[in-house]
């Protein structure tokens, strides 16, 4: 246990040192509005909209959770998210001034909404959203489908407004840069990406590029064991390495970076995203120290790592609900659940050893 803790501490220290090497230009290249035009033919269909500053401020607003007023009748979501039992909290008291009344009114972005409606239509009627770098994966729990699938402006606004991870894009994108001069990007963009209901999560991979060489490939979904890709491991390695050599290595300007891909059923590869090397990018089945020290020669095979048994499944990287909702204090529901799970695990272990 002590050795494991020491190893973890060393990894944390190493990752902090690695973060300091980031440059603003490397982070900027990974913005979707920067890389997508160049790799459009080998990515998924996307429409990109520059966001007005008023909408950016709406996302940053820490006031009441108000959804924008829709200019379209087809939006069915309510304008306010609240508990009906707390309706009195949303009433304007007599004698309040006009400023207080105005502050409680939901915002409206008619031009942006109309543009987004047209883009959703062009993309087949359903999309998933992301800002310059990040998608609101942490707020999928709030949608009616439990996914990032959106068919209207209100659904998009709901996911963006409820997301904590997007605060990285809005406020902390350059915190990891050693040459930091900007506090935030000059402009923010909303990327609407075509929704594909039949995508297989086991066929998404993260590729690690160091000194312009592909040095590692990791299964992107590390919380599940997929037996079907075990037999494809070698062919997938060759396929991905060839794709990198032919389509990415000489076209993406950074020396060190990562990129996410999806392998289709007919073995075509689609680029999903580009990410900086280190910083807040997850190394998944690797750790940054071993990736940083990797000095693979051109003729060596790339290390492709997948979850090869149920025993090595990684825990979820993010919870499906906000951390504040997880009350693990003694006597709480989660505390009891964890105690029950631990007791059941001990019982299974003792029965297996009997």
Image (spheres, rainbow, N blue to C red):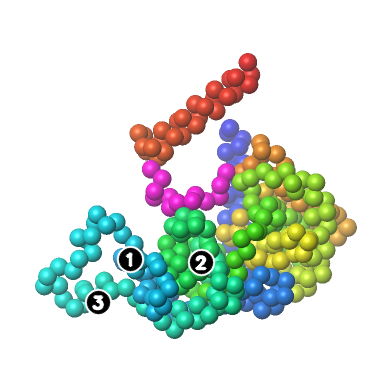
* Magenta residues (range): 315-327
Whether 118 is drawn above or below 172: the answer is: below
Q: Nearer the viewer, residue 261 or 67?
A: 67
Q: Quadrant of the C terminus?
A: top right
- The residue lying toward the viewer, choosing from 282 and 231, is 231
Q: Work out whether mark 2 precedes mark 3 in sequence or the reverse, and give the earlier one.
A: 3
Q: Residues within 10 Å of mark 2 (few under 14, many from 20)?
A: many
Tell me where residue 297 appears, x and y as whole percent. 85, 58
Percent position of residue 25, x then y: 62, 74
Residue at 66% from the left image edge and 38% from the top image edge: 310
Q: From where the camera sits, is residue 258 visible? A: no
Helix, strand or loop at label 3? It is helix
Front: mark 2 or 3: 2
Which of the numbered marks, if any, corresponds to residue 150? 2
* Residue that appears at 15% across and 72% down: 96
Q: CA distance from mark 2 to mark 1?
A: 18 Å
Pointer 2 with pointer 3, Cβ within 8 A: no
What residue did someone put label 1 on?
80
- The alpha-carbon separation of the residues under discs 1 and 3 comes to 15 Å
Secondary structure of residue under mark 2: loop
Q: Earlier in the sequence, mark 2 or mark 1?
A: 1
Labels 1 & 3 near each other (Cβ < 8 A)? no
């Amino acid at each position: 246990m002590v050795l494991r803790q020491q190893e973890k501490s060393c990894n944390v220290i190493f990752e902090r040192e690695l973060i300091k090497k980031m440059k603003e230009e490397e982070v900027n290249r990974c913005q979707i509005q920067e890389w997508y035009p160049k790799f459009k033919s080998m990515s998924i269909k996307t429409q990109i909209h520059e966001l007005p500053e008023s909408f950016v401020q709406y996302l940053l607003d820490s006031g009441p959770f108000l959804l924008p007023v829709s200019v379209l009748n087809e939006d069915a979501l309510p304008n306010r998210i609240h508990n009906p039992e707390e309706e009195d909290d949303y009433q304007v008291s007599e004698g309040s001034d006009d400023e207080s009344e105005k502050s409680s009114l939901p915002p409206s972005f008619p031009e942006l909404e109309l543009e987004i409606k047209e883009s959703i239509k062009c993309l087949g009627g359903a999309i998933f959203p992301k800002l310059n770098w990040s998608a609101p994966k942490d707020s999928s729990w709030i949608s009616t489908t439990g996914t990032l699938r959106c068919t209207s402006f209100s659904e998009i606004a709901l996911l963006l407004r409820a997301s904590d991870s997007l605060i990285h894009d809005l406020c902390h994108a350059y915190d990891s840069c050693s040459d930091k001069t900007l506090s935030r990007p000059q402009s923010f963009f909303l990327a609407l990406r075509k929704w594909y209901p039949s995508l297989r999560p086991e066929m998404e991979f993260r590729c690690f590029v160091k000194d312009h060489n592909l040095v590692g490939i990791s299964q992107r979904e590390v919380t599940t064991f997929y037996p079907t890709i075990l037999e494809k491991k070698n062919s997938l390695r060759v396929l991905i390495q060839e794709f990198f050599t032919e389509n990415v290595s000489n076209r993406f300007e950074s020396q060190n970076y990562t990129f996410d891909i999806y392998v289709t059923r007919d073995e075509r590869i689609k680029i999903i995203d580009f990410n900086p090397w280190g910083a807040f990018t997850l190394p998944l089945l690797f750790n940054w120290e071993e990736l940083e020290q990797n000095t693979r020669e051109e003729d060596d095979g790339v290390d492709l790592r997948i979850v090869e048994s149920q025993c090595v499944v990684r825990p979820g990287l993010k919870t499906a609900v906000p951390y504040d909702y997880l009350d693990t204090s003694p006597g709480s529901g989660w505390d009891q659940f964890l105690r029950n799970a631990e007791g059941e695990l001990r019982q299974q272990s003792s029965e297996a050893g009997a």
